[in-house]
Each structure stands twice: as structure tokens, then as C-alpha cells.
Image (cartoon, grey):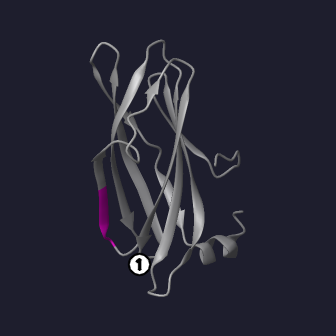
């Protein structure tokens, strides 16, 4: 799943890094664009954390907002020891050629403190727009 390329964006909250990239996917027959994105959450702190929920927003080029405020990551509540990472991928259908994904993940430390881990702001560009500009 993970790829190292120039399209990866990264944000840092303390000693926790979140990297993200878009996976260009195709449109369906209803003029909707299927967006795919991957996140990698790296725990470079000196304590264990548990990822509890995602609090994401996607704003498309038509001005519509879509929210993902839910517990877990596909049913998982990953525990990350110092030096470990978790990779997550998901998809969403939108009726727009471009969008921006932003928000945070919520985690809990081993002593019960809640952490809000910032996501990098990620541009999503439709597959036909990506090939137009030779991004991949």
C-alpha cells in the first residue's frame, strides 16, 4: 500500500507524524469520482498510543463538505508502541474534479491523555486531471 514519492504530504504533532497521499481511482458511470487516499501514522514518541477515531473533512471543488467523524479505522483501534506505525486507506465518491482532505486523528496515551493528531492538508485531483499534469 505505502509508496514513497513526491506526492506524499506530512504533518507533525509532537513526535507523531502523519503522512498521506492520494490514490487516483476511476469515475463510475454516474459522473462521480472515486477518491482513494492513504495515511501512515508514525509514533516517534516515547510512549504507547491508541488510535481512537478519525475526524476528517473533505471539501470538494463544488463547495460541498463531507465529514468522517467516527471511532476506529475500519473497525480497528490500533495500539502503536514507540517506533511503530499504522497504515490506513479509504475511498469516497464525490461529484467533483478536485477536493481537499484535512482534519485530525484522535489518540489516547497509555496514561489516558487524549491527543489530537493533525492530518496534513491533502489535495485530491481526479484521475483525468492527474494525467493532464503528469503527476504520476
Q: Position of residue 119 (x, y in %)?
A: 43, 42
* Residue beneath the point at 49% across and 22% down: 15
10 Å crowding of disc 1: few (<14), some (14-19), many (20+): some
Residue 108 is drawn in which quadrant?
Answer: top left
Q: Which quadrant of the figure contains the C terminus? A: bottom right
Q: Is residue 65 magenta?
A: yes
**Residues rendered magenta in the picture:** 63-67
Q: Position of residue 17 (x, y in %)?
A: 51, 31
Q: Is residue 123 magenta?
A: no
* Residue beneath the point at 31% across and 70% down: 64
Residue, disc 1? 95
Left or right of 97 on screen, residue 104: left
Instruction: Give the camera-side residue of 73 and 127.
Output: 73
Farthest residue in the front direction?
75
Residue 65 is drawn in which quadrant?
Answer: bottom left
Left or right of 26 on screen, residue 81: left
Q: Position of residue 34 (x, y in %)?
A: 49, 71
Instruction: Give the camera-side residue of 86 and 136.
Output: 86
Does dot 1 land on a helix, a strand or a loop?
Answer: loop
- Magenta-highlighted stretch: main secondary structure? strand
Amino acid at each position: 500500500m505505502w509508496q514513497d514519492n513526491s506526492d506524499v504530504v506530512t504533518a507533525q504533532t509532537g513526535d507523531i507524524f502523519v503522512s498521506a497521499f492520494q490514490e487516483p481511482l476511476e469515475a463510475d458511470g454516474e459522473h462521480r469520482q472515486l477518491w482513494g487516499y492513504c495515511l501512515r501514522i508514525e509514533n516517534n514518541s516515547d510512549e504507547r498510543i491508541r488510535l481512537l477515531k478519525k475526524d476528517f473533512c473533505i471539501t470538494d471543488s463544488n463547495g460541498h463538505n463531507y465529514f468522517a467523524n467516527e471511532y476506529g479505522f475500519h473497525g480497528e483501534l490500533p495500539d502503536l508502541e514507540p517506533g511503530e506505525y499504522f497504515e490506513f486507506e479509504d475511498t469516497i465518491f464525490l461529484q467533483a474534479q478536485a477536493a481537499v482532505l484535512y482534519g485530525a486523528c484522535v489518540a489516547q496515551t497509555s496514561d489516558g491523555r487524549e491527543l489530537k493528531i493533525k492530518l496534513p492538508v491533502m489535495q485530491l485531483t481526479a484521475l483525468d486531471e492527474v494525467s493532464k499534469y503528469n503527476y504520476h
